[in-house]
């Protein structure tokens, strides 16, 4: 049994108490997933949670907002907790604090540890703190973390779903509940027991608006040239705005770069694309900085436009699809990992796509969600860090 | 082969280039349309934000019990609707040089400031990356939230100010701009309006409490006075009956003279009580009456009390005993209106006057005699 609590109380201790109440009323939780708005005192929140639920493992972390059936929002004081009451559902939790010294190594450490413990086809939830530094903003990229994880995992086949956490939509910070306490620059792998399986739907919202272009110069996440021309120039011509004037909107609000997997010349299918948000445009170098450093010289990309109508449609289709796939199964909990950029305040969508998901998803399954920096979900058989997506995962047991 | 006639491969290459160009142009138009649509939605959202903020804020009138609570909840609504990082409400101090920070939100583990020196506050202000932060008022205002990008409104009439701020300039979707004046001033004016309403409510409640208290005091005073009227009246009736019926015989002129004196004194005392009632009437009309303090001899007052109470006591077989030192030197100041009344009544009288808004110094002076050795014992015990 899983119970979910929600609060938007501005007092961190009271928020924890309000989140814990429905869980405590149902029984004794054996572990919990918790997400806490960035304006909270996270220590006080965790302390409050432990006061109510006891000294149980808590995983999750900061969130730009939270999503539950009781309430959702992204003002900074929203909190949500899912308490798992059945001792059989208790996972193995493996954490590392080595993100600051190297994302690949941190992923490798986790992957190797998971390989030793996890049964074949297990489901693993992976959470990590997204923000490495502020002023200027520097992120912990998810792609080397996930790459290291798979490397450490070897030939073990499992489902990986997860997210990079944020305190708010402005990338002001991030932290983690790693199962034992509070941590920054950390990652935590939550290995679910073998009887719990996952179905995942990736919900998109971008369409290609350019022909294919080759990345002709890139260093890490910094794209200098597209088709041999300065990347900023290519984008500015396309968008009709000066991206480096300081007055323009954040480029991440306008366009992304997308890589199409599978048949490049096949019909458009949203699941075929891995999109990368553009963090900033740099006048002095003519380059753009992506959220992730996984594109290489020679990668063929397209400029992608957000499409709010498509985003809403994708939510409807994805939600219906996952309900169909889990129809005859005993669903334990649904986890909704939602890119913070999809929130109406940022995307300009006329409705909250999280509301659309809540309206369309079955109401008898406990649900906890949060607004994230990066989403991790399977694309073409292997999980990758994704941008501008929402990932709806249902944990279920057979029968 | 004619070099001017393109080959099929060249045609295909040109066709590909044509479609690529057209596709990119179409894509650019789609992207700009999408962006314009998003911008329109965001602007509409801003208008909705103002409306929603005002609607939610006005609910505070019913949801809150104190002015302090209004401030805390108002900031919560402001932060929730504007998605800003921090917010604060300030009130200009009486010296008009400083602002006192009354409420804050979003500081987390950091201590917010208590006050700020700001002699010339602007009525509206905002900062962007183009603002010269080292110059006032930006230099001063950014110290409130300790964030660089802020939106400020100050209402000169109420002397309240509201400020919200962000760490990054493009918070959520765009920098602050002049068009945000409606939002910040709207929120501030709603807050001030609710504060005034709450203050009026609190004043009304206090006035109601005071009126109820005054009514109760008046009732107690009148009840006490009714009782007090009976004592001298009983004396008058009792002594006059003794004289009329010559109950002590025809040859006790001295005793009858003494009783006539008692009747006169009781009549005088009755007059004093009636004056008190008139004073009360004045008090109700004017709100206060001037008190005149006069010295009086304690022993005289005690003997007077004995004379008034004696007939009734004798009738009921109660022995009344008074012990006052002959040379008691104490002279006390007492209000003219009650100076000649018995000490046992003084407390009730003072109590009644105090509850009707009498000066507190009266109590201090009037209670002193009791503490200096007056004891009064009746069926309720000693007091």
Image (cartoon, rainbow, N blue to C red):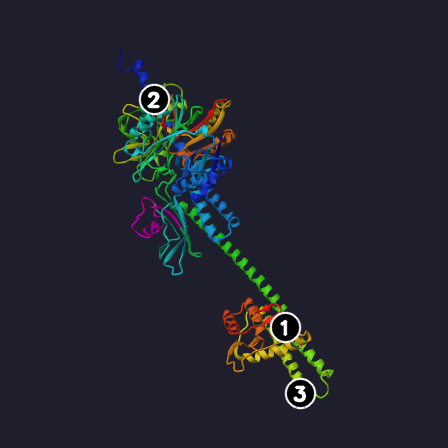
Kindly indicate the quadrant of the structure image that contains residue B346. bottom right
Asked if the stretch drawn in magenta spans residue A171, the answer is no
Chain letter of disc 1 in the image: B
Q: Which is more N-terminal, label 2 or label 1?
A: 2
Asked if the stretch drawn in magenta spans residue B132, the answer is yes
Chain letter of disc 3 in the image: B
Q: Which residue is mark 1?
A: B228
Kindly indicate the quadrant of the structure image that contains residue A103. top left
Residue B187: x and y, percent? 45, 48
Q: Nearer the viewer, residue A75 or B173?
A: A75
Query: Is there CB contact under 8 Å for labels 3 and 2?
Result: no
CA gap, disc 3 and disc 2: 141 Å
Query: Is there CB contact under 8 Å for labels 3 and 1?
Result: no
Chain letter of disc 2 in the image: B
Asked whether the viewer can see residue A43, the reply is yes
Question: Residue at (41%, 45%) from the top-left corner?
Answer: B180
Front position among marks 1 and 2: 1
Q: Tag 2, which secondary structure?
A: helix
Give, as a single range, the part of the protein colored magenta: B128-152
Q: Is residue A97 left or right of residue B245?
A: left
Whether callout 3 and callout 1 share a subunit is answered yes
Q: Which residue is mark 2?
A: B18
Q: Nearer the viewer, residue A297 or B373?
A: B373
Residue A12: x and y, percent? 42, 43
Front position among marks 3 and 1: 3
Q: Tag 1, which secondary structure?
A: helix
Residue A59: x and y, percent? 40, 34
Q: Which is more N-terminal, label 2 or label 3?
A: 2
Q: Which residue is mark 3?
A: B254
Q: Tag 3, which secondary structure?
A: helix
């Amino acid at each position: 049994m899983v119970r979910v609590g929600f609060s938007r109380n501005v007092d961190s201790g009271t928020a924890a108490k309000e989140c814990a109440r429905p869980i405590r009323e149902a029984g004794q939780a054996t572990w919990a997933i918790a997400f806490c708005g960035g304006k909270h005192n996270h220590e006080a929140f965790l302390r409050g949670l432990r006061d109510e639920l006891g000294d149980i493992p808590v995983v999750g972390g900061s969130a730009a907002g939270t999503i539950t059936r009781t309430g959702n929002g992204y003002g900074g004081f929203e909190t949500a907790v899912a308490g798992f009451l059945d001792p059989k559902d208790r996972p193995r939790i493996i954490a590392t604090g080595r993100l600051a010294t190297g994302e690949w190594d941190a992923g490798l450490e986790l992957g190797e540890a998971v390989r030793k413990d996890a049964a074949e086809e297990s489901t693993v939830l992976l959470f990590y703190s997204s923000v490495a530094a502020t002023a200027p903003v520097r992120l912990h990229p998810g792609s080397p973390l996930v790459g290291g994880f798979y490397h450490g995992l070897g030939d073990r086949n499992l489902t990986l779903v997860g997210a990079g956490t944020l305190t708010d939509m402005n990338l002001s910070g991030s932290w983690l509940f790693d199962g034992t306490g509070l941590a920054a620059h950390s990652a935590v792998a939550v290995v679910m027991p073998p009887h719990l399986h996952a179905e995942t739907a990736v919900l998109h919202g971008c369409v290609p608006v350019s022909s294919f272009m080759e990345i002709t110069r890139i260093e890490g996440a910094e794209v200098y040239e597209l088709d041999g021309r300065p990347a900023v120039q290519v984008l500015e011509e396309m968008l009709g705005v000066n991206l480096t004037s300081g007055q323009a909107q954040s480029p991440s609000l306008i366009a992304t770069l997308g890589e199409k997997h599978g048949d490049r010349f096949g019909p458009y299918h949203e699941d075929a694309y891995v999109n990368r948000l553009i963090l900033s445009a740099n006048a002095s170098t003519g380059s753009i900085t992506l959220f992730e450093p996984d594109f290489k010289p020679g990668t063929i990309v397209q400029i992608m436009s957000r499409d709010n109508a498509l985003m809403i449609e994708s939510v409807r289709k994805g939600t219906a699809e996952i309900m169909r796939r889990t129809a005859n199964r005993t669903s334990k909990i649904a986890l909704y990992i939602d890119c913070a950029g999809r929130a109406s305040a940022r995307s300009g969508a006329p409705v909250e796509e999280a509301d659309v998901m809540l309206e369309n998803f079955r109401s008898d399954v406990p649900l906890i969600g949060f607004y994230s920096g990066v989403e991790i979900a399977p694309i073409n058989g292997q999980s990758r860090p994704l941008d501008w997506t929402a990932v709806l995962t249902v944990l279920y047991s057979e029968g | 082969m004619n070099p001017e006639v393109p080959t099929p491969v060249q045609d295909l290459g040109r066709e590909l280039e044509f479609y690529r160009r057209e596709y990119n142009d179409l894509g650019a138009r789609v992207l700009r349309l999408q962006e314009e649509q998003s911008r329109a939605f965001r602007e509409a959202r801003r208008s909705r934000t103002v409306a929603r903020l005002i609607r939610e804020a006005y609910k505070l009138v019913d949801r809150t019990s104190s002015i302090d609570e209004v401030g805390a909840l108002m900031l919560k609504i402001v932060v929730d609707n504007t998605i800003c990082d921090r917010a604060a409400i300030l009130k200009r101090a009486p010296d008009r040089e400083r602002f006192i920070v009354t409420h804050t939100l979003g500081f987390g583990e950091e201590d917010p400031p208590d006050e700020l020196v700001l002699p010339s506050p602007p009525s509206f202000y905002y900062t962007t990356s183009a603002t010269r932060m080292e110059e006032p008022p930006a230099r001063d205002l950014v110290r409130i939230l300790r964030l660089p990008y802020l939106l400020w409104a100050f209402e000169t009439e109420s002397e309240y100010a509201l400020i919200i701020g962000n760490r990054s300039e493009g918070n959520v979707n765009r920098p602050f701009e002049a068009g945000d004046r409606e939002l910040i001033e709207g929120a501030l004016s709603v807050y001030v309006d609710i504060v005034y309403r709450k203050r009026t409510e609190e004043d009304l409640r206090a006035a109601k409490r005071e009126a109820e208290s005054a009514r109760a005091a008046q009732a107690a005073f009148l009840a006490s006075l009714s009782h007090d009227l009976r004592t001298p009246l009983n004396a008058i009736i009792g002594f006059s009956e003794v004289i009329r019926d010559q109950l002590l015989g025809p040859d006790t002129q001295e005793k009858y003279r003494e009783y006539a004196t008692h009747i006169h004194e009781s009549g005088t005392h009755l007059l004093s009580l009636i004056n008190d009632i008139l004073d009360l009437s004045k008090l109700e009309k004017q709100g206060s009456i001037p008190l005149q303090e006069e010295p009086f001899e304690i022993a005289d007052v005690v003997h007077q009390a004995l004379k008034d109470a004696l007939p009734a006591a004798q009738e009921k077989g109660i022995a009344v005993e008074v012990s006052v030192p002959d040379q008691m030197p104490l002279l006390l100041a007492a209000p003219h209106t009650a100076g000649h009344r018995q000490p046992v009544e003084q407390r009730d009288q003072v109590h009644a006057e105090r509850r009707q808004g009498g000066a507190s110094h009266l109590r201090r002076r009037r209670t002193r005699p009791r503490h200096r050795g007056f004891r009064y014992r009746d069926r309720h015990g000693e007091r």
